[in-house]
Every structure is written in structure tokens, then in C-alpha cells.
Image: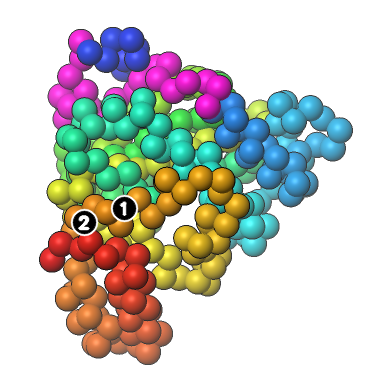
Amino acid sequence: MKSFRAILAGDLDSVSLKSEMETYGYVFIRDLMPKEVLEQLLNDMIGIASDEGWMIEGSAPSDRLANSAMACFDPDPKYKQAANRAFCLERLHALKHHPVLTDVMKRLVGPRLLVHPKPIARIIFPNCEAALLHAHQDNSGIAGSSESYTAWMPMHDCLLGQGTLEIKEASHLSGLQCTDGYIKPEAAPGGDWVGGRINAGDVAIFHSLTVHRSTLSTSNQLRCSVDCRFQSYDEAVSPLEIVFPNRAKGGRTWETTYADWKHDDLKYYWRDLPLRIKPSLAELAEKAENADSPEKRLRYTTTMELIEREIPMLVH
Ligand SMILES: O=C(O)CCC(=O)C(=O)O
């Protein structure tokens, strides 16, 4: 496997991240995030894994030794419960606003940065085929403008064989692939697959059209990582990146997410931004009227109500 083109955080001022991104579809920055910040979030995530019985009893939490009898992944309710708890972590949400990260993202998208409100904290069992995310493009899930970016970072050193991330170089140049699920690796456009060891502090940032995949961990440890998304708020964003219309998917709300937070400054921050959504309210209203089943019509209506509440500064 060809290695990531690594850029040292200390060299950022002598590199054009934008042109690297345009050419390769990703930038891989070594030693960007402060380790102590990651360590605190890692401890929170390990605490959840431990409560859920996901670690070998009596082992040191920092060893992250997985209790393989408990192995699970989405949509298993046991996984959802832990994922919902992780989603509420205040430190998870603070991480995506860390100035070191937002500074890099502004180099890519400009000063009008929208930090997507829903980061993902992943606690992944080793040897768990079900947890593998095969080749895909994030834009097929996050929609909105294709000019959005994902930042992926492990909370601890992640060696080869411990479940890392691989990226298909320059695959973003071929647009959104037509697929009803994962992209077949042999059909993925672009150049070589790149990968390698990703340490705590390193961040892989890739375009929403860049094909990427996770790799199976053959170790005995849980892998804890975070991915979060960014774009300019001059570009359209999918409202589903902000509201929670599908209560069946775990019943998340912003109120429950914030219930135990100690600070208020990072709550509802997008409400001050002049966002454009895609689909627009007019398109959603048309669907709320004409979708082919009562369930879908109700879902569009609920989504519209949530949008009107959660995104008051909409620019039409
Ligand atoms: O962390 C993983 O296992 C996969 C992450 C991924 O594919 C993504 O962030 O889009």
C-alpha cells in the first residue's frame, strides 16, 4: 500500500492545502492536534465502552482490550446506545471547534466556515466485519454541496492492522459514483489506494467525493476515532446535518445532547449563520404534499418543522 502524502503540521505555512486537496482529494497532516485534548476525549469514550461491558474486566482502561463477546455495530441497539452516549460528549463537540482544526479548515474553505454540528465518535471492535465501512464517498450520505470535507482522526496511535483509514487518491475528480451501497474497490475511480499508520494528533482530511474505506482491525483493542465535517456556509448544506427528523434512529435531540454540558458557548452555534439548505424548504414542502406514502409525507412535514425551529437564519 502506498503511504499517505504526509504534511507536517509545522510545514503548513509552506504548503498550499487547497492545491493538494484539488489534486489528490485529501491532505494528511501529521502532529496537528494537541495530544492532551485527544487523550481527554479518549478517556470519555473508554469510560462509555467500559460501562457498556465492551472491555475485558480487570484490564487497564488505557489498554482498550475488547471484550469480543460484546462485539456489535450499527444498527444493533447495544451499539446505538453507546453511540448515542458518545454523541452527547461535550469534548467531542468541542474537538470539532478546536482552533487548530478550524484554522486548517479555513485554509481549505475560506473564512466563512460551517462546522457541521454532528460529529461521529466511533468505538470500533476489532475483527468486526460488520463495522467495516467499505469504499464509499461521504457526499452520498451527507448530501448538500459536494464542497464539504471530512476530518478523520484517531484518539490514540493507530498502527496498520488496528483498523485505520484508506483513501483512493484523486477519486474526487470523477464525481459522485452511481451505486446503491458501497463502491466496488475495483470500480473505484482515481489513482492508488493510500494508507498507513495514523498517530494520535494526525488528521486525514478528505473531499466529500473522495472514495475511502476503513480497514479491519486484527488486534485485540477497541479503536476510538472521530470524524467531523466542514464546509463554507456559502455552499448549501443538507438540513439533515443539523436536525434529527428520524426519532426511530435513536431519539436524539439537541436538548438531550446538551443535557450534561458544562458550557453554553458551543450550543446551537449554527443558528447565527446565514445558511442555505438543500433541499430547500420549498422542495421539502412539495414532497410533504406529494410523497407517495403517508409515512414519507409525515417525515417531510416533521423535517420542515424541525428546520424552522433549529435553523432560523435560513437564506432562501
Ligand atoms: O472510521 C471509520 O471506520 C470509517 C470512517 C469513514 O468512512 C468516514 O468518516 O466517512
Please indicate whether residue 212 sits to the left or right of residue 281 in the image. right
- Up the image or down, 169 lies above or below 240; here it is above
Q: Callout 1: helix, strand or loop? A: helix
Do the numbered discs 1 and 2 sit on residues whose CB atoms are within 8 Å?
yes
Residue depicted at 39% across the width and 37% down the height: 97
Which x, y percent locates residue 240?
35, 62
Which residue, given by chain and number where applicable, does mark 1 sit on?
Answer: 270
Q: Callout 2: helix, strand or loop? A: loop
- Label 1 beta carbon within 8 A of ligand 1: no
Q: Is residue 208 visible?
A: no
Residue depicted at 40% across the width and 26% down the height: 203
Please indicate whether residue 23 sits to the left or right of residue 130 in the image. left
Which residue, given by chain and number where applicable, does mark 2 sit on?
Answer: 275
Query: What is the three-letter code of the residue carrying label 1?
Result: Trp
Q: Quadrant of the N terminus?
A: top left
Q: How far separated are the C-alphas under marks 1 and 2?
A: 8 Å
Which x, y percent locates residue 282?
17, 76
Say whether residue 291 is magenta: no
Which x, y percent locates residue 96?
41, 38
Outermost residue to the right: 58
Q: Quadrant of the C terminus?
A: bottom left
Q: Is residue 45 visible?
A: yes
Which x, y percent locates residue 198?
47, 22
- Up the image or down, 92 lies above or below 141; here it is above
Residue depicted at 22% across the width and 80% down the height: 285
Residue depicted at 52% across the width and 55% down the height: 258
Question: Which contiguous range is marked in magenta?
Answer: 14-37
Say whether residue 25 is magenta: yes
Please indicate whether residue 45 sits to the left or right of residue 53 in the image. left
Task: Give the mark nearer the N terminus: 1 vs 2.
Answer: 1
